Amino acid sequence: MVEVLIRNDKYGGPDWTAGRWYGTDYSVPAKNPADQAYKEHDQAYDACIEAGGQVGCYLKADEDLVEKLRVVDLSDYSVHDSMYATAALAFFDAKILRERWQVFLIWFAKGKEGQRTAKDTKYLDEQRDLQRKREDVKETHDDQ
């Protein structure tokens, strides 16, 4: 029963890819738009691993997933698929908030010492831009 709750369709869930635990075959088609978002998230995480596992890379992948899930129309989904997508959205929203808070604390500490770097400023600017885009998508989705 627990296994059913932690995975969904072909790509939803930790270490669940292409309908298999620790799968690697991305040629397996996604079942629906939410599953496609999970698939792209899996691919983005793989790219992050190959790029050296920088936190910002995973954060961007998580933000992209949230952005895509927000616009999925869940009205035709099964109860299980709809609940899974809603739970994934809530989980990743919380994860993003936690990571942004950590970034802010680091930025604040560096700023107080006058050691904020151009890279820190660029990252924070990118995060603000992503937040604005996310709010625009949410407003568009809410208007529909």
Image (cartoon, rainbow, N blue to C red):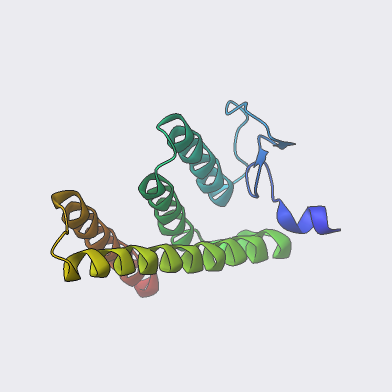
Can residue 100 be seen here?
yes
- Give above or below for 80 relative to 41: below
**In this rendering, would 28 be left or right of 137?**
right
The residue depicted at 44 percent of the width and 39 percent of the height is 53
Provide residue 52's location: percent of width, then percent of height.
Answer: 42, 34
**Residue 71 position within the rendered picture, expressed as x and y whole percent measured from the top left:** 44, 60
Asked if one can make out residue 75 in the rendered structure from this viewpoint, the answer is no
**In the image as oriented, which residue stretches furthest toward the right?**
1
Residue sitting nearer the eye, 41 or 10: 41
- Residue 79, compared with residue 44, is above or below; it is below
In this rendering, is residue 95 above or below 47?
below
Residue name at image x 53 percent, y 43 percent: 36
Residue 18 spot, x, y in % from top left: 66, 34
Q: Which image quarter is the C terminus in?
A: bottom left
Q: How many marks?
A: 0
Q: Residue at x 39, y 43 (%)?
A: 54
Q: Residue at x 55, y 51 (%)?
A: 34
Q: Quadrant of residue 10?
A: top right
Q: Quadrant of the N terminus?
A: bottom right
Comparing 131 with 37, the one in front is: 131
Across and down, in percent, residue 66 comes to 45, 58
Query: In this orientation, which residue lies closer to the viewer: 72 or 59?
Result: 59
Picture quadrant of residue 17: top right
Left or right placement of residue 111 versus residue 103 in this view: left
- Viewer-closest of 140 and 97: 97
Q: Is residue 4 left or right of residue 39?
A: right
